Image (cartoon, rainbow, N blue to C red):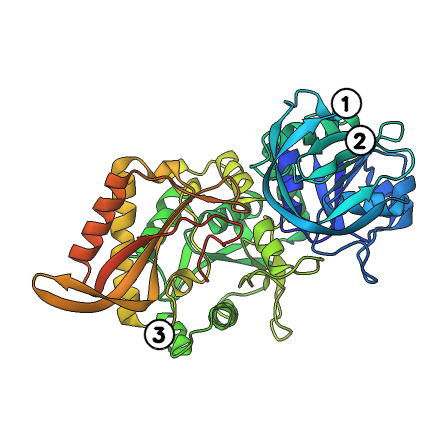
């Protein structure tokens, strides 16, 4: 395997994902993991990720000194590159010009790291420090317009350092560079989601004893459906699937979920209508983080109460993903982007143990796992829907009236995308009800009503995303229908920001 040391970059898990999708098994580890632990794992290579620190800070993150002496290839990325330079006597300083975005990679010499990589290809930069002097024993392998030491290395020890992020989709030959590093490590491309499914199923069978029940939170979304399917395959007699209607779902969502689990998954579903409770607790709340906390805490409370109806419930299963973990930065070196209701463990008063079989994989891997488990493509390729539901797609207070306005607009957007064939071409599409009103004219009358934002993005894993280039005719049709058919909306705007710097959801 290759082990990726997490120094806190928002892209760290993407390195793992890129390697896995090419068939090379990779795992994530804390930046300060001991070298002995890496040796015990059988690590054939180590990647030092990017991160928000600067190596010249007094409290800068540093790996265990033994990592440098493992005798395996090392790859430093951004902060990892600067740490490698600093550790071996190079110089790293704050750059006069920060570099964020596209740059061109100019190859300076032949290296096995660049096999199949085109000279002048685009790479993605995201840094405010730069290396100004190389350590002894290292040589320049590539440059960029703004970096004399864009890539450097010590071929004898197979140590390599990249200023850019090869893991993001914007780096044109980034995946090829990671593949080359894996080959340098001597790895074979033989890992698959089929292997992962067998591994997790075996672990569940060992962990969950015959008389113990697993309470599985399902929502109809891809993640919880795959978790339920995985449990149904591994421990069918132990599964108790529970669906909570929190009042924050889309139009007809509850009925769709009931039918899907009964007819397509063959899983008995226990239905709980807790919409009144959730909406009452959200009354008057406008802060997005507070909304998420309220929804998460209420969600767990309802589940704890529901669990009392079953005997011998020991576990609570959740569809926590890698992306949830990194954005919440639980137990890592990263900075929190936003909290997730299903990340961070359970409150002390809750007696369940958590089962999170998806917490080490990404959304596209979850879809592949779903297909591996026999789920239909309709279920597996549904657009992502957040756990807090429409509450984080309403800017400001959540009320029944505002929910109804948003639901009607959202139905129109999805219907038009499906009718035009664009639904399956995009990663995620939804409407956001803004907390602003604007002047409009309908007929001969002045209106002062709500604005709604249409958000449609393209992505492969949700860690990065760009807005979808929808045809103007389609956008016009969506806008016209929403304004004409939804009372309370007189303006439609389209979000053309990418992630980063924006997130996909608005809250």
Give the residue at x 92% y 37%: 136
Which residue sits at x=41%, y=75%?
A: 282
Rounded to the nearest whole Å, what is the CA distance between mark 3 and mark 2? 63 Å
Query: In the rendered image, which quarter is residue 422 located in?
Result: top left
Q: Nearer the viewer, residue 375 or 192?
A: 192
Q: Secondary structure at mark 2?
A: strand
Residue furthest out toward the left: 444
Asked if the residue under mark 1 is in contact with the one under mark 2, i.e. CB atoms within 8 Å, the reply is: yes
Please tell me how crowded label 2 is: few (under 14), some (14-19), or many (20+) other residues with Cα within 10 Å.
some
Q: Secondary structure at mark 1?
A: loop
In the picture, the disc for residue 109 is 1
Front label number (3 vs 2): 2
Question: What is the tally of numbered marks visible in this picture?
Answer: 3
Label for residue 485? none
Q: Which residue is mark 2?
A: 140
Closest to the observer: 333 or 373? 333
Q: Find disc 3 in the rendering and name its residue.
A: 276
Circle 3 Cα neighbour tier, 10 Å, few/some/many (<14 / 14–19 / ≥20): few
């Amino acid at each position: 395997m290759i082990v990726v040391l997490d120094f806190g970059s928002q892209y760290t898990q993407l390195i793992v994902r890129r390697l896995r999708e090419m068939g090379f098994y990779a795992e994530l580890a804390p930046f300060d993991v001991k070298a002995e632990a890496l040796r015990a794992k059988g690590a054939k290579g180590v990647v030092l990720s990017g991160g928000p620190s600067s190596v010249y800070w007094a409290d800068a993150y540093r790996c265990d000194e033994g990592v440098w002496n493992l005798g395996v290839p090392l790859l430093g990325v951004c902060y990892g590159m600067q740490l490698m330079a600093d550790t071996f006597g190079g110089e790293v300083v704050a750059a006069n010009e920060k570099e964020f975005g596209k740059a061109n990679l100019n190859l300076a010499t032949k290296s096995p790291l660049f096999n199949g990589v085109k000279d002048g290809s685009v790479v993605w930069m995201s840094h405010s420090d730069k290396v100004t002097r190389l350590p002894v024993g290292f040589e320049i392998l590539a440059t960029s317009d703004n970096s004399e030491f864009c890539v450097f290395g010590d071929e004898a020890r197979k140590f390599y350092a990249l200023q850019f992020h090869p893991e993001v989709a914007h780096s044109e030959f980034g995946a090829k560079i990671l593949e080359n590093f894996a080959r340098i490590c001597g790895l074979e491309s033989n890992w698959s989601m089929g292997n992962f499914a067998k591994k997790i199923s075996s672990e569940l069978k060992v962990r969950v004893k015959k008389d113990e029940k697993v309470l599985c939170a399902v929502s109809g979304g891809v993640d919880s459906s795959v978790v339920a399917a995985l449990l149904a395959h591994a421990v069918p007699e132990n599964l108790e699937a529970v669906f909570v209607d929190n009042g924050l779902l889309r139009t007809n969502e509850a009925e769709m979920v009931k039918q899907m689990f009964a007819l397509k998954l063959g899983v008995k579903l226990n239905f709980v209508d807790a919409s009144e409770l959730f909406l009452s607790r959200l009354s008057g709340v406008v802060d997005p983080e507070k909304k998420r906390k309220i929804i998460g805490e209420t969600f767990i409370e309802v589940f704890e109460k529901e669990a009392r109806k079953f005997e011998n419930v020991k576990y609570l299963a959740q569809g926590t993903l890698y992306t949830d973990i990194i954005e919440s930065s639980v137990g890592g070196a990263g900075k929190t982007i936003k909290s997730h209701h299903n990340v961070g463990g359970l409150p002390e008063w809750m007696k369940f143990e958590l089962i999170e079989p998806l917490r080490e994989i990404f959304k596209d891997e979850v879809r592949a796992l779903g297909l591996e488990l026999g789920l239909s493509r309709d279920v597996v390729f549904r657009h992502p829907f957040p756990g807090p539901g429409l509450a984080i797609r309403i800017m400001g207070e959540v009320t029944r009236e505002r929910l109804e306005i948003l639901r009607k607009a959202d139905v129109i957007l999805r219907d038009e995308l499906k009718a035009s064939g664009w639904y399956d071409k995009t990663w995620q599409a939804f409407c956001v009800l803004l907390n602003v009103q604007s002047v409009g004219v309908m007929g001969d009358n002045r209106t002062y009503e709500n604005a709604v934002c249409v958000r449609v993005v393209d992505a492969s894993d949700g860690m990065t995303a760009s807005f979808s280039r929808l045809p103007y005719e389609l956008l016009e049709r969506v806008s016209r229908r929403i304004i004409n058919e939804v009372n309370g909306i007189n303006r439609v705007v389209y979000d053309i920001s990418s992630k980063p710097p924006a997130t996909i959801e608005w809250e």
